[in-house]
Image (cartoon, rainbow, N blue to C red):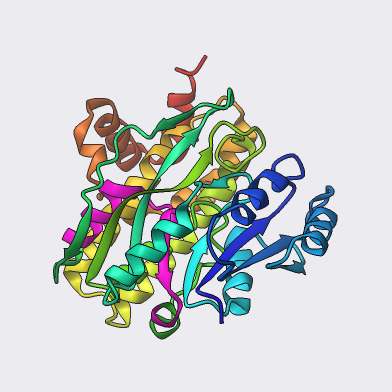
Amino acid sequence: MPLFSIIIPVYNVQNYLSACVKSVVEQPGPRDWECILVDDGSTDQSGAMCDALAAELPGLQVIHRENGGLAAARNTGLKAATGDWLLFLDSDDAMAPGLLAQLRGALAAHPDCDWFIGKHLEWQPDGTLTPHDGLHLVPGPFASSDYAARLKALYTAGHWSVWKYCIRRSFLEQARVRFLPDCVWAEDWPFDLELLLRCDRLYFLDTVFTHYRVGRQGSLLTDAKNLPKRFRGLAAAQRRLARLSANGTADAAAYAAMQDAAADVFWPQARTAAVRDAAIRKACLPYIEQLRPLYPHGTEVRTRRDWRLFRWMMQTFGPRFTLWAASLQRK
């Protein structure tokens, strides 16, 4: 049985896939890992490249599936994983050199921990690597029975990024937490919020896990046409959090912290949806309406006057008028 299972969802990344896989294969040390490439119905040469790489390089496993989105692809990888520890890597990013060697030492030194969190560097279009501004990771263990305190520690260090985690597979299976297939954008944060309910002890490592590629055109993060998908995912996540509250999995205090966290994801996207393209605004509106329970919530929205004004307009006039009015300020 391998020590690590590295799960890489693959979709239309023919220009980046080889570098991603190479970053795993060239990790120093024993080959105590399996790398699971989940081709999510790619329409370019990515699927064929997965097969070619697996035929050439030991340790790679390929699964082809119909397109279902990043969350569904990660769940497919989880079903196939056999390693003691789980790592996630996006197919346009790269695993930091020497990561697995550092993790072997950390796992042996802290056998009572189930969830390790590290850092990342941003991989700029010109090839340079830079730290991500605004994150503050304090190395060492963090234990608390207060859900909100655990949430704050995780968010401050990482901003919902599973490709900076190393999670014990048996713990995840026992927790029965999976990625939400309906959450086709930012699927990390509802996964994190739910998993935090089952884990009161985190371990933060002063270790770079991932070189995260920024500014790739056509990704869910950069293409305005994907805005409706973002809100559809937010609405799906909100329904999941509401069920966790209704069935008693999350108590009142934990659910309140979850709502603030969800709103902190929602509000920047709501402002982004104030685009000049009326068709995009119209496609977003049904999901933004479903997210009305989040309107009173959020921590970051309280810190800026313009955000507070935007929220007041959303609560007073509704999203249709507010997005239209805000779009008039866009160039």
Q: Residue furthest bottom?
A: 174
Q: Is residue 179 visible?
A: yes
Instruction: From the viewer's side, name the closer residue of 116 and 257.
Output: 116
Residue 118 coordinates in the image, percent (x, y): 36, 52
User: Is 85 placed left or right of 248 in the picture?
Assistant: right
Quarter of the rendering occupied by the N terminus: bottom right
Q: Residue furthest front?
A: 29
Residue 227 coordinates in the image, percent (x, y): 56, 42
Instruction: From the viewer's side, name the closer residue of 12 and 116.
Output: 116
Q: Residue at x 44, y 25 (%)?
A: 325
- Does the magenta run of residues contain 157? yes
Q: Which residues are magenta?
A: 148-171
Q: Residue furthest left?
A: 145
Residue 195 coordinates in the image, percent (x, y): 35, 70
Please determine whether, in this image, residue 51 is positioned above or below residue 132. below
Q: Residue at x 22, y 72 (%)?
A: 200
Please determine whether, in this image, residue 130 is positioned above or below residue 212. above
- Please name the predominant secondary structure of the magenta segment in the image: helix
Residue 177 coordinates in the image, percent (x, y): 44, 76
